Image: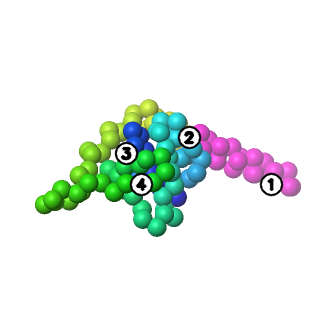
């Protein structure tokens, strides 16, 4: 699913994620909204008023005004890395349990 990450009424980033992950990172943003099923999909730099997305202003002679991309959040990257390691560990544990069950004739 595709989500808009919104802080201070501005779409800061767009991510593709599972619902559980989006829920976990929602504490770092004002809103985390699924956008892939919207008729008009917003992008980085769009506004959000708590209900509707707002198209960015357009310069008279140029493209939409966009905010610079947000800096990478080192804490979020560390959390993702830790979760990935835990998933790998669980996968190994499940494989070992499956092998034991099969060895016991189950």
Q: Secondary structure at mark 3?
A: strand
Q: Residue furthest bottom?
A: 39
Question: Percent position (x, y) of residue 78?
Answer: 46, 34
Question: Percent position (x, y) of residue 91?
Answer: 64, 47
| Residue denoted by label 3 | 10
Sooner in the amino-acid sequence: mark 2 or mark 4 = 2
On whether residue 54 falls in the magenta region, the answer is no
Sooner in the amino-acid sequence: mark 1 or mark 3 = 3
Sooner in the amino-acid sequence: mark 3 or mark 2 = 3
Closest to the camera, between mark 2 and mark 4, is 4
Instruction: Please give the range of residues in magenta.
Output: 85-106
Tell me the CA gap for discs 2 and 4: 23 Å
Tell me the CA gap for discs 3 and 4: 9 Å
Sooner in the amino-acid sequence: mark 1 or mark 2 = 2
Question: Percent position (x, y) of residue 93?
Answer: 68, 43
* Identity of the residue drawn at 20% across and 59% down: 63
Looking at the rendered image, the quarter that the C terminus falls into is bottom right
Residue 85 seen in render? no
| Residue denoted by label 2 | 24
Of 2 and 8, which appears nearest the observer? 8
| Residue denoted by label 1 | 102
Q: Secondary structure at mark 4?
A: strand
Q: Which label is found at residue 61?
A: none
Tell me the CA gap for discs 1 and 2: 36 Å
User: With respect to residue 71, does 44 lie above or below?
Assistant: below
């Amino acid at each position: 699913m595709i989500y808009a990450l919104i802080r201070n009424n501005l779409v800061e980033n767009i991510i593709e994620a599972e619902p559980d992950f989006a829920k976990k990172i929602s504490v770092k943003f004002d809103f985390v909204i699924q956008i892939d099923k919207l008729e008009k999909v917003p992008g980085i730099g769009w506004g959000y008023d708590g209900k509707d997305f707002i198209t960015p202003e357009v310069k008279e002679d140029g493209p939409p005004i966009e905010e610079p991309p947000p800096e990478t959040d080192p804490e979020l990257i560390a959390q993702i890395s830790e979760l990935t390691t835990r998933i790998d560990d669980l996968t190994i544990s499940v494989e070992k349990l499956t092998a034991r069950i099969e060895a016991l004739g189950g």
